[in-house]
């Protein structure tokens, strides 16, 4: 039998896993649904893709609201809103016949639904686990992302062989609703509400409170934002262009290129918790948690730099492409949770929701769009993916540079 502290902590991780599973389910299935939607509705690929772009904009705006919610009431209200709007995003989109209806249903409902999931899941785990306990616990929660990427994307692909995209979206709406309702039931408020302190124990641990003005007057938060922003630029360029790079630049069959891409998700199932353990061991050896998180935030984008270089070796051997895919997974396993962990180490837990919610709005509202756009734009004007991959490489390198200059403390907030 689990003791009460471990039982509550397990429920926090399980609820965050489900939230991440649903969030990345939206991202993983869009590329699979794009072609049949475009063919059936008669719209251009750009028109259909605009719905996803607008969804990410609404997602970023909603992320800040979810951070305010979790600071006050914990993640349960955010997961509940995510369940309703996330399910409606798929279901209402499956009913559309006109383009304005598509933009409204997918961008607004899906944007609000997914926007309630990222900050609430990362911050809830951070509020429950600190120091050398955070990264491995977040690693288990973040494992929901690659599981979703593999299961839902391949599942939808198989469903589409027997039914149309509308039926596939309706099935996804049920998956989202059921998963997030379960996450809502399992979720917990902050540990202080149960007379606990982060990571276990029975003595409440108060933390410093910060206003947004105080936090955003420090280089710590802006350094973290810049490190995360540039990593997202490189990441989303790779996610959206790497399959076509392998096909058009290297000459691989589409099936082989897709399998290499799926390897990112498959390896993530193992590497998410494993890199969490490694990150926590690095933290445990440092005098300050912030130093350990900083080290990992330097290492993660450098993995992306090496992965970009190895992409070109795919022309000589598939092994190079496979190693590149795994290194991208290493980056992915560390960066998103690691930068939230650094922010938590600097600013504490009491005000982390709103602080990191606003950072997420800034980063997710710009980084993914820029990376996706530049990947296609540079290919269009040059006829080669060389410059797109180099752009991603430089973006990852700049992320490492800003991480190198991250401070280990900031001016203390008001107690």
Image (cartoon, helix red, strand yellow):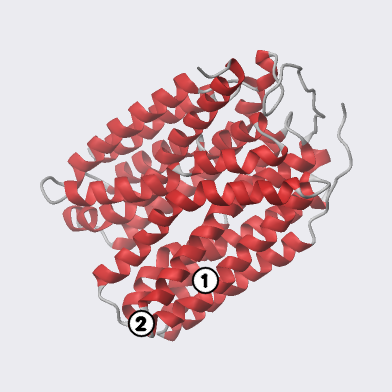
Please, what secondary structure does the residue beneath circle 1 have?
helix
Question: Which residue is more in the foreground, 12 or 353?
Answer: 12
**Residue 236 at x, y = what percent?**
49, 61
How many residues crowd mark 1 within 10 Å: few (<14), some (14–19), many (20+)?
many
Q: CA distance from mark 2 to mark 1?
A: 15 Å
| Residue 230 seen anywhere in this rendered image of the structure | no
Q: Residue 92 is drawn in which quadrant?
A: top left
| Residue 48 seen anywhere in this rendered image of the structure | yes
What numbered label is drawn on residue 68?
none
The residue at the far front in this view is 1
Residue drawn at the location 44% of the way across and 42% of the way down? 144
What residue is shown with label 1?
A: 307
Is residue 168 shown left or right of residue 22? left
What residue is shown with label 2?
A: 250
Question: Which residue is more in the foreground, 97 or 209?
Answer: 209
Q: Residue 380 is drawn in which quadrant?
A: bottom left
- Number of marks in the image? 2
Q: Earlier in the sequence, mark 2 or mark 1?
A: 2
Q: Is residue 253 above or below residue 268?
A: below
How many residues crowd mark 2 within 10 Å: few (<14), some (14–19), many (20+)?
some
**Residue 148 at x, y = what percent?**
37, 45
Question: Which residue is more in the foreground, 281 or 31?
Answer: 281
**Residue 338 at x, y = what percent?**
64, 49
Q: Is residue 257 above or below residue 194?
A: below
Residue drawn at the location 53% of the way across and 40% of the way down? 118
Please, what secondary structure does the residue beneath circle 2 have?
helix
Mark 2 or 1, closer to the camera? 1
Q: Quadrant of the C terminus?
A: top right
**Residue 272 at x, y = what percent?**
51, 49
Residue drawn at the location 64% of the way across and 29% of the way down? 128
Residues under numbered marks 2 and 1 in contact, where contact means CB atoms less than 8 Å apart: no
């Amino acid at each position: 039998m689990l003791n009460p502290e471990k039982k509550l902590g397990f429920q926090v991780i399980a609820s965050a896993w489900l939230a991440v599973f649903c969030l990345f389910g939206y991202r993983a299935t869009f590329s699979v649904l794009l072609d049949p939607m475009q063919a059936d509705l008669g719209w251009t690929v750009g028109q259909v893709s605009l719905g996803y772009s607008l969804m990410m904009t609404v997602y970023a705006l909603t992320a800040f609201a979810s951070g305010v919610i979790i600071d006050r009431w914990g993640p349960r209200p955010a997961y509940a809103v995510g369940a309703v709007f996330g399910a409606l995003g798929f279901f209402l989109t499956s009913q559309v016949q006109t383009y304005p209806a598509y933009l409204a249903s997918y961008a607004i409902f899906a944007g609000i639904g997914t926007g309630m999931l990222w900050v609430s899941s990362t911050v809830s785990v951070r509020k429950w686990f600190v120091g050398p306990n955070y990264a491995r616990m977040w690693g288990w929660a973040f494992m929901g992302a690659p599981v979703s990427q593999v299961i839902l994307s391949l599942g939808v692909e198989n469903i589409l062989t027997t039914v149309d995209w509308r039926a596939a979206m309706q099935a996804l709406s049920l998956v989202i609703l059921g998963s997030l309702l379960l996450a809502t039931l399992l979720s917990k408020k902050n540990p202080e509400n149960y007379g606990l302190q982060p990571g276990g124990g029975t003595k409440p641990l108060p933390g410093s409170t910060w206003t947004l003005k105080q936090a955003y007057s420090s280089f710590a938060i802006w350094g973290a934002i810049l490190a995360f922003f540039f990593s997202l630029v490189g990441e989303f360029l790779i996610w959206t262009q790497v399959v076509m790079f392998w096909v058009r630049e290297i000459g691989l069959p589409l099936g082989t290129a897709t399998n290499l891409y799926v390897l990112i998700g498959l390896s993530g199932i193992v590497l998410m918790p494993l890199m969490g353990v490694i990150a926590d061991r690095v933290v445990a050896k440092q005098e300050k948690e912030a130093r350990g998180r900083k080290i990992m935030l330097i290492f993660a984008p450098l993995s992306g730099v090496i992965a970009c270089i190895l992409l070109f070796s795919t022309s000589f051997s598939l092994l190079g492409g496979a190693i590149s895919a795994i290194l991208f997974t290493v980056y992915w396993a560390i960066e998103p949770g690691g930068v939230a962990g650094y922010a938590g180490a600097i600013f504490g837990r009491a005000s982390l929701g709103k602080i990191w919610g606003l950072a997420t709005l800034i980063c997710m509202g710009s980084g993914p769009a820029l990376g996706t756009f530049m990947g296609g734009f540079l290919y269009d004007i040059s006829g080669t993916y060389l410059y797109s991959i180099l752009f991603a490489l430089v973006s990852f390198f700049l992320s490492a540079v800003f991480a190198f200059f991250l401070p280990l403390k900031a001016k203390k907030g008001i107690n």
